[in-house]
Amino acid sequence: MDTTKHDDAGTSGSGGSHTGGSRTGLFRTPISGGVHSATAVHDLPPPALAVRNLMEQARFAHLCTVMSRMHHRREGYPFGSLVDFAPDPFGHPIFSLSPLAIHTRNLLADPRCTLVVQVPGWSGLSNARVTIFGDVFPLPAEQQEWAHQQYVSKHQQWASQQWGNFYYYRMHTISDIYFIGGFGTVAWIDVNEYEALQPDKIAMDGGEHNLKELNSMFSKPLKELLSTDEGEVDDVAVISMDSKGIDIRVRHGAQFNIQRIAFEVDHSVETLDEATEALRRIIGKSRWHTRAQL
């Protein structure tokens, strides 16, 4: 695993200066100390697990294929396109592809590609993203229904409406994984470690519904929590959740940054109810400290 320092990860796009985290569980300033220190200081999942969680929570990604010979003027160039996907139990992405799409034709001619997956609610270079290198092939006819069920599980009705017009493909071989997690986390992930991990239960169950519920309950309290003496924030949104905490997109005017709140519990948070209770404790503790200082 590469522990290269990356001074820009987690800092690009942040507006203005921010003081260090003085409130319990809140980290205001991303660090640049490499994978291990970032993971420890911000109470993040290990990088390989963070990638598995990201693959579960994201629904769309950028697929970069090699332009095939039929587009002779651009043969050999990278061709980027936006696709939907669903991970299989080993974290290998499955795609529902049209036979008419350029990226599908490219894959049939050359299966090499990369998939760039970004955290939902992406707003800039401070957000987590991963680049997965691999080879994509069409699944055999006897696995098409299985792949369809993977899609229905992730995309619900939207996926089932495409059945019959699209064919399912899978990244059979993952050769490399490059992760930028924000908060100073940059790493080449061991593929075997990635494939052996199970994502956090809370990342698998609920997905976008859980994020919507947290935002409906905590949008105003989080806005108060994240405001400083320098001024109030204009908008906050929970964009990612794992067993250890949440990542929040914060807007000051036209500037965005990502901030982390750790759950501060001695066990893995697995359900929406547990996450809700953990956030209520943190917000309640912050309000108590604020009143005590007045």
Image (cartoon, rainbow, N blue to C red):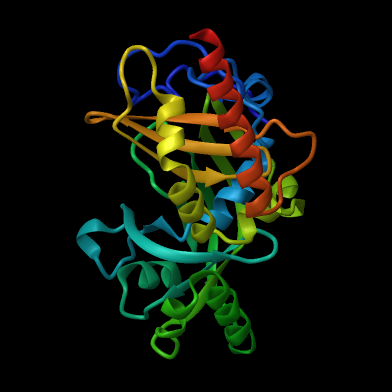
Query: Which residue is at the front of the view, 265 or 153?
Result: 265
* Residue 223 sits in quarter: top left
Name above or below for residue 279 compared with residue 175: above
Q: Position of residue 127 (x, y in %)?
A: 43, 36
Q: Residue at x 42, y 69 (%)?
A: 109
Q: Residue at x 51, y 37 (%)?
A: 247
Q: Position of residue 244 (x, y in %)?
A: 67, 38
Name above or below for residue 270 compared with residue 98: above
Residue 224 appears in the figure: yes
Residue 245 appears in the figure: no
Query: Which residue is at the front of the view, 17 or 127?
Result: 17
How many marks are shown on the rendered structure?
0
Q: Residue at x 46, y 16 (%)?
A: 7
* Residue 178 sits in quarter: top right
Q: Residue at x 30, y 18 (%)?
A: 231
Name above or below for residue 44 compared with residue 80: above
> In the image, 123: left or right of 289?
left
> In the image, 109: left or right of 275?
left
Q: Position of residue 294 (x, y in %)?
A: 48, 9
Q: Quadrant of the N terminus?
A: top right
Query: Which residue is at the front of the view, 202 or 199?
Result: 202
> In the image, 208: left or right of 201?
left
Q: Position of residue 138 (x, y in %)?
A: 53, 76
> In the image, 276: left or right of 131?
right
Name above or below for residue 171 compared with residue 179: below
Query: Which residue is at the front of the view, 179 or 151?
Result: 151
